[in-house]
Image: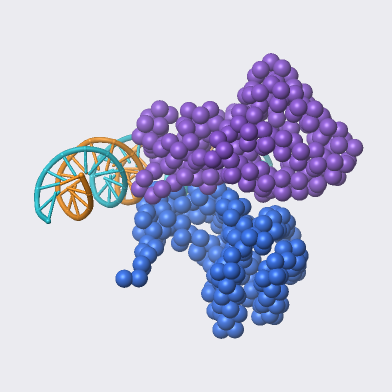
Chain colours: A blue, B purple, C cyan, D orange
Amino acid sequence: MTRQQFRRPPTAQEAVLVELRRAIISGELRPGEQVLQDALAERFGVSRVPLREALKILEGEGQVIYRPHRGYFVAELDIDDLREVYRIRDLLESEAVRVAVPQIAAEEIAALAEALEVVEHASACGDLPMMAEANRRFHFGLIEAARMPRLSRLVRVLWDATDVYRSLYYSDGSHREVVHNEHRAVLEAVRLGDADRAVTLLLAHRERAVSALERVLPPR
Amino acid sequence: MTRQQFRRPPTAQEAVLVELRRAIISGELRPGEQVLQDALAERFGVSRVPLREALKILEGEGQVIYRPHRGYFVAELDIDDLREVYRIRDLLESEAVRVAVPQIAAEEIAALAEALEVVEHASACGDLPMMAEANRRFHFGLIEAARMPRLSRLVRVLWDATDVYRSLYYSDGSHREVVHNEHRAVLEAVRLGDADRAVTLLLAHRERAVSALERVLPPR
DNA sequence: CAAGTGGAGATTGTATCCAATTGACCTCAG
DNA sequence: CTGAGGTCAATTGGATACAATCTCCACTTG
């Protein structure tokens, strides 16, 4: 029997956490909106207790804002926040790549290549959720090769905080074309063991995204 | 009436969170130890509900590890973890200082100087808790002058994660002497607007601490 | 009309109670 | 002796009930 791993969340709070993330990314819960606990708990078929525990995790990640006795509110990210997040990502991801490239294993590089194929295929099919998932696999496959778990975790939180904007960026087909080329160049640099080049390419990769978003977003 | 600000935590979970942090820093809750909810809740005079919500925050900060159906355990930080935290701090705090120095206000610099005086006075008196508090005021006064709230928050979590080791380092009087000189040099560089020099001094400041700790800690 | 006051209703915060899960120990077949 | 299975106490997970707090708005008062 091929080790089928049940991935069912063992507790309600974890299941709720997954659903909450989905709801925020999908825009079902809109920025600034109050999270009405009774209503949401009922919708998820649980009581408020596990919902509140899940919200505490999201609070720690900055996805919701907690105001005592007022409740939880979906965080709003303006363009300045976005720039700050991307600046921090530059610092952390650059370090990760510099550490990762010299020590990355062949199988890990193969996994990156596979992820990129899925990204391009999903993009061509217009399957944006699958593309987003494979895109994460690519980027985090590289980052995690640095074997710095805390750093990976921080970067993951930063990605989560800006998921909404990322899907906005990727919803444009011409952006996706540019990104595919950038990805391939990064993979090539990783293959050659050229960490500096990979870092530079990724900096440009992020800068392109954030400046495109600046043109789209409310200028405050 | 001089605006006396009540600083009482408005909710039990926040009060418990403060107490939990204290218990972890003080070593009352030891690394690896399970947090027994019934016992702790009773000690704090609250039910398990607010305690669990406070634990969720600490989980998000990596101060405790959550294992479903098993409970919360105080995180253990080995020397590799410590090095990783310090490396991330190097990246984030260097950025903060580079941004902060060119735009820091005169009153903010004055606050830094004041904090340093308290650090040295408390150190001379052997009042380590007060020294730790003032030391934070100094470092975060500088970091927050960068006006990058997310970055400040990340750095704060990293500090919290290594609080135990910091007090260990500062418990040695000769270390404290070195640190005072380093602090004064940093302040001088900030006054002169020499961001690069401040960054370099702070890198050395951290490196001195972490390598001293490496000599003290179990070498795995 | 401005500013303050006092509920009513909505919402959050927490205590209590019970169900579910775990882990240690015991039993017993092989 | 060894390991599979069973039992039970300890502990965590979650539902419910109620207390505390906030928000809104009509009302008063100057």
- Image quadrant assignment for residue A90: bottom right
Q: Residue furthest top?
A: B125
Q: Answer with left or right where residue B72 lies relative to residue B110.
A: left
Is the residue B174 above or below the residue A8 in the image? above
Q: Nearer the viewer, residue B151 or A172?
A: B151
Q: x, y percentage for residue A41?
A: 40, 56
Q: x, y percentage for residue A171?
A: 63, 76
Would residue A164 be seen by someone viewing this image from the given angle? no
Q: Answer with left or right where residue A178 lies relative to residue B42.
A: right
Q: Answer with left or right where residue C28 lies relative to residue C10.
A: left
Q: How many marks can you see?
A: 0
Residue name at image x 53 percent, y 45 percent: B62
Residue name at image x 78 percent, y 31 percent: B183
Q: Nearer the viewer, residue A147 or B198?
A: A147
Would residue A6 be seen by someone viewing this image from the given angle? yes
Is the residue A155 above or below the residue B89 in the image? below
Q: x, y percentage for residue D11?
A: 33, 39
Q: x, y percentage for residue A194?
A: 73, 66
Residue name at image x 70 percent, y 77 percent: A181
Q: Quadrant of the C terminus of chain B?
A: top right
Q: Nearer the viewer, residue D27 or A217?
A: A217
Q: Quadrant of the N terminus of chain B?
A: top right
Q: Residue furthest bottom?
A: A125
